[in-house]
Amino acid sequence: MGCFQSTARKQFPGHEDPVILASQTAFSVSEVEALFELFKSISSSVIDDGLINKEEFQLALFKNRKKENLFANRIFDLFDVKRKGVIDFGDFVRSLNVFHPNAPQEDKIDFSFKLYDLDSTGFIERQETFLEADVNQDGRIDKSEWQNFVSRNPSLLKIMTLPYLRDITTTFPSFVFNSEVDEIAT
């Protein structure tokens, strides 16, 4: 594992050990390593600095870095955990984890709530979403109301699961054979 670690740390300021990231997420070690390959590709698409900026994120999602997109901006803001205007590898993996098919439903509900709480008040307000979810009709939706609304409308969480993350190594099959880390059974 030495080569992977030392090389990655020099070039990628927010790089973390794939074994640790795998233990904290639904991803296996080889999936984390495959995500590192994806991360390297995205983070070098505009500025090769080992971090993903908003323009690179937009380019990766929509193949277009010029058109402003509220959805892409909101997701970028949620992935930018440290609020530095960039996403490092650890935050990339931890944030992407919520979209894994094996991620806990509660994590998906929390992320989707934050996504729709556009002004980060802890409430989804009338202009942000559906009146139907505001059960107590106080003009805003708290997390409990959102959880009840999502349980009655499970299709809202479909965007919170990306099936191909179940086995990211099939996206980068050559990487499976080049992994320098043995999988740890959980």
Image (spheres, grey):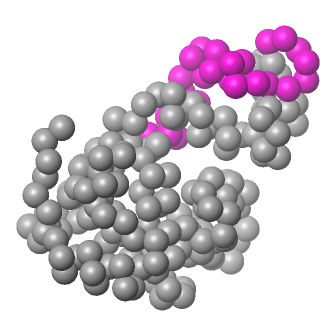
Q: Position of residue 71 (x, y in %)?
A: 67, 54
Spot occupied by residue 53 in the image (x, y as percentages of width and height): 59, 75
Q: Is residue 10 above or below residue 147?
A: below
Residue shown at the point (88%, 14%) measured from the top left: 137
Q: Is residue 92 left or right of residue 165?
A: right
* Residue 52 lies within the magenta run: no
Over which residues does the magenta segment extend? 135-161
Seen in the picture, residue 158 relative to 46 is either above or below; the reply is above
Q: Which picture quadrant has residue 122?
A: top right
Magenta portion: prevailing SS class: helix
* Quadrant housing the N terminus: bottom left
Q: Give the residue drawn at x 30%, y 47%.
A: 23
Residue 9, position as x, y percentages in the image: 36, 79
The quarter of the rendered structure image containing the C terminus is: top left
Residue 39 relative to residue 180: left or right = right
Q: Quadrant of residue 33?
A: bottom left
> Outermost residue, right direction?
138
Query: Is residue 131 placed above or below 100 in the rendered structure?
Result: above
Describe residue 18's horizontal placement relative to residue 88 as left or right: left
Whether residue 11 can be seen here: yes
Where is residue 48? Give x, y as percent. 48, 88
Residue positioned 39% across, 85% down in the render = 11
Magenta segment includes 145: yes
